[in-house]
Image: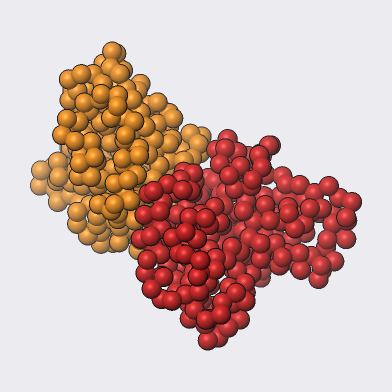
Chain colours: A orange, B red
Amino acid sequence: MNRRPIGVFDSGIGGLTVVRELLHQLPNESLIYFGDTARVPYGNKSPATVRRYAREILDFLVGRDVKMVVVACNTASAHALEELKRVSPVPVEGVIDPGARAAVAASRSGRIGVIGTAGTIASKAYERAIHAHAGAAVVVAQACPLFVPLVEEGWLDHPATRLVAESYLGDLAKHDIDTLVLGCTHYPLLKPLLAEVLGPAITLIDSAEQTARAVSATLAHSTLHAPKASAGGVHFVVSDAPEQFKRVGKRFLGEGVKEIELFALGDGEGR
Amino acid sequence: MNRRPIGVFDSGIGGLTVVRELLHQLPNESLIYFGDTARVPYGNKSPATVRRYAREILDFLVGRDVKMVVVACNTASAHALEELKRVSPVPVEGVIDPGARAAVAASRSGRIGVIGTAGTIASKAYERAIHAHAGAAVVVAQACPLFVPLVEEGWLDHPATRLVAESYLGDLAKHDIDTLVLGCTHYPLLKPLLAEVLGPAITLIDSAEQTARAVSATLAHSTLHAPKASAGGVHFVVSDAPEQFKRVGKRFLGEGVKEIELFALGDGEGR
């Protein structure tokens, strides 16, 4: 048993969908969440830059004495997970493998769609993860760069968002997929709209739930679980604009974000 | 006369609309353009963070021996121009005052609209600049956070972009404005669509042209113009993802971007 916190990070606010699920499944755990709001988004940045940012955040979280790190960002998982696992002194879990595993379990036809940021899709990380579990699966991928800004604007059910979704998903649907992985932690907020656009024949996989299960399994395996009597909760840290994080965070977390620590990474103060 | 380059910077790619106009109006000048693509966008970041980034870029450009600096980014102009002017060893010009001046000159009713990023609008920098030239002007401002990602996606004439524009501009139009300042260097690419949505009674002000005029005036005033025989041209530098800059840059510049230097700011290598 271990009372140290679990570190969770994302480029910004999307990882809160994973936090929500962690709080639900692991109510006794203390979490420390880092959102890199000074450099958000990661989705259109190069693998090398995303890796550099992720390493800085890993160092920050390890400095806060975490017992485990959850990369609650698909782009960072796609580009940096292997490197983080190699250098981290504590276990590291990403969001891609849990999502891929759930998609393989859900699909009957073996034809699986994946949507994500430009960076996640270009990395082909989901294809690799899905094929590791189901070599014969057919994976059809589509970058959806406008979904993140639409979610951050709060236009979850706006006619423009519907048009954007129809534009991005129209081609995907032609490939006869029966399962679609929401490969970005922002996308669960669009689930009702995406379900409407795609129709009931396509199962939507939200990796937050699966990731929380994987974290729970890792804790159990390493006997790192917090005691049942622990209160749990989250401490929030962002690299910029805490007020905005507070305002938008509620939509993701389902409850209000109270205190937020501001910590600038990647500059003199933070290094 | 002075053959040293003019430094131009933006959070990413939008400043190329200003570069295009500088090349047109000042064909003998050498430009060095810095796009902070590792930390783009600036529009949703805090004033303090934008100022820190802008200071780093100023230092970089001064290190490259520029004779003048053009802040070709509305958010950076809004938050950092005063500080840059105070600390810079060379003249600094932003995009806001030239745009405000042109709007005041164009408006007959004195009712002026301004659109921009969340940061630019929250700063009220355009209100201040417009009132400095026309104390009685009525300024109506509207943040349009989705325009930048839509432009970067290349959806300049997409039905979704039209819906977004109608949503953002519907309220503005009700205020009886006769002039609208495009307060973000990405927006000139949406000019045809915005003109359609708003109708012919509203004059659109694109500050790129005005900014180039202001730069020309500063050069003349300080006798910093390059000799008429100079060839001119642009050297491009970005902090991340040069290939993407090349791909999207053509839309902004109207011609291809050939060589691009990669220079990481704000980390060990760049400092």
Q: In the drawing, does residue A232 fall left or right of residue B232?
A: left
Which residue is situated farthest in the left direction here?
Answer: A229
Pick the front one: B52 or A66: B52
Identify the residue at horizontal 19%, vertical 54% (top origin): A254
Q: Position of residue B84 (x, y in %)?
A: 64, 65
Q: In the drawing, does residue B149 fall left or right of residue A135?
A: right
Q: Position of residue B83 (x, y in %)?
A: 61, 68
Identify the residue at horizontal 66%, vertical 39% (top origin): B256
Residue A16 seen in the figure? yes
Identify the residue at horizontal 63%, vertical 39% (top origin): B262
Which residue is situated farthest in the bottom direction here?
Answer: B136
Pick the front one: B46 or A221: B46
Dividing the picture into quarters, in which one does residue B246 lie? top right
Number of residue marks = 0
Q: Position of residue A256 (x, y in %)?
A: 22, 60
Which residue is situated farthest in the top direction here?
Answer: A136
Residue A12 seen in the figure? no
Identify the residue at horizontal 20%, vertical 44% (top origin): A192
Pick the front one: A213 or B9: B9
Please, is residue A35 above or below residue B25 in the view? above
Which quarter shows the N terminus of chain A? top left
Q: Position of residue B189 (x, y in %)?
A: 54, 52
Which residue is situated farthest in the front direction here?
Answer: B200
Dividing the picture into quarters, in which one does residue A129 lie? top left
Q: In the drawing, does residue B152 fall left or right of residue B250?
A: left
